[in-house]
Amino acid sequence: MNALDAAPAAGHWRDDARVIGCVGFAHLLSHFFQLLLPPLLPWVKGEFGLSFSALGFVLTVLFIVSGLTQMLAGFVVDRLGPGATLAAGLACFVAAALVLATATSYPALLAGAALSGIGNGVFHPVDFSLLNHRVHPARLGHAYAVHGLTGSLGWALAPVFLVGIAVPYGWRTSLYAAALLPIAVALLLFSQRDSFAVTPQATTAAEPASAPLFAFLRAPAIWWCFAFFAIVAAAASGVQNFAPTVFAALYTIGVTEAALSITVFMLASAAGMFAGGWLVHRQRRLERNIALAFGLSAVGATLIGLAWLTPLLAFVAIAAMGFGNGLSGPSRDMLIRSATPRGATGRVYGVVYSGLDLGIAVGPLLFGRLLDAGRHGAVFLGIAGLLLAAMLMAAGVAARTLDSG
């Protein structure tokens, strides 16, 4: 397999920084809209009289639609270019916020979630197409680190923004305000369009004219990447959804203190992203970087799950998990790039990153059953097991990339 598209020529670092910054803002927005509804569920539940199961299905719809959209968006990016695809995604975000803000029925909530899923599904194919074609390879590790960091910031911003407006002005007003954010990002990207635009010809120039559109799906490394991302996302969903519940039950601390476990995980993950950008340039064996990162996270998860720690040390352990999660990010994204055939960047990232949505959709169902059975520690032991499996999958991707290279 010829792993890489034609590398961009070396340019000034300011040009690369401008591209990385614009893509980062777009990625922040996509993660923000993944949490468009969850912070507002107490208000929505009270107004519509819905069960938590019904509300949970709304969120499941978002990620199912997002996963399907990612697969299709990759083909669109390779044929039409990332600009038009990104514009459609931003328009879907505006529509999603407005539909949810004016919803008066359960089907309207489902429609808003579906629109948000469509919008979210375009971002990974667009982002990585832009980064791979416009940023010089010497700076890609840092680009991927910033990309991951801005996504985490989007998750962190959503609850503060939405709840901060919902408390004084109502949950519908917060959604109207959220609808303005994609418009602002669209104006920013439009103002910078000349510095990072990628034409459809540029994305496919390296691909032989006779190459079948779906030829890349025959590469085993692509499906190993898909499985790798599904496993990683399932593990992350366990932390993001259930860490406060587990901490409160295992370490007998209050709900407020337990909720800090997510904050600690996210902050440590952001620090890990920065370190991961440095690591990917120091150590080119990407599977080794991932093994180091996930090994650290798995140890932290195991210690938490066994409940051998004091509450303070449990927070140290989840910080180690977060740091390992962030540390893996740039190497993980570079590993996918190494498995990408020429001219198929959008398609590969679309298919591979749809594994994230699969993992996010399935993970909570698996871990939720453990909590229903009262097995709180088993949640983090299960996360540790998934991280170890992800290490093996990363080694499998590397082996198949080398074998076919």
Image: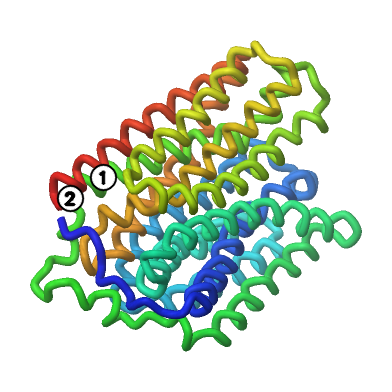
Q: Amino acid at mark 2?
A: Ala
Q: Which residue is mark 2?
A: 219
Q: Quadrant of residue 205?
A: bottom left
SS type, badge 2: loop
282 or 123: which is nearer to us?
A: 282
As drawn, which residue projects farthest toward the front?
282
Q: Is residue 21 visible?
A: yes
Residue at coordinates 49% horizontally, 33% vertically from top-left?
Answer: 235
Percent x, y for residue 140? 42, 62
How packed is label 1: few (under 14 Cα within 10 Å), some, or many (20 or more)? some
Is the residue under label 2 in contact with that under label 1 (CB below 8 Å)? yes
SS type, badge 1: helix
Quadrant where the image shows the N terminus: bottom left
Percent x, y for residue 240? 61, 38
Q: Which residue is mark 1?
A: 223
Q: Amino acid at mark 1?
A: Trp
Percent x, y for residue 13? 49, 75
Image-based side of 27 in relation to 134, left or right = right
Q: CA distance from mark 1 to mark 2?
A: 7 Å
How packed is label 2: few (under 14 Cα within 10 Å), some, or many (20 or more)? some
Image-based side of 257 in relation to 209, left or right = right
The numbered dot on residue 131 is none
Residue at coordinates 61% horizontally, 75% vertically from top-left?
Answer: 185
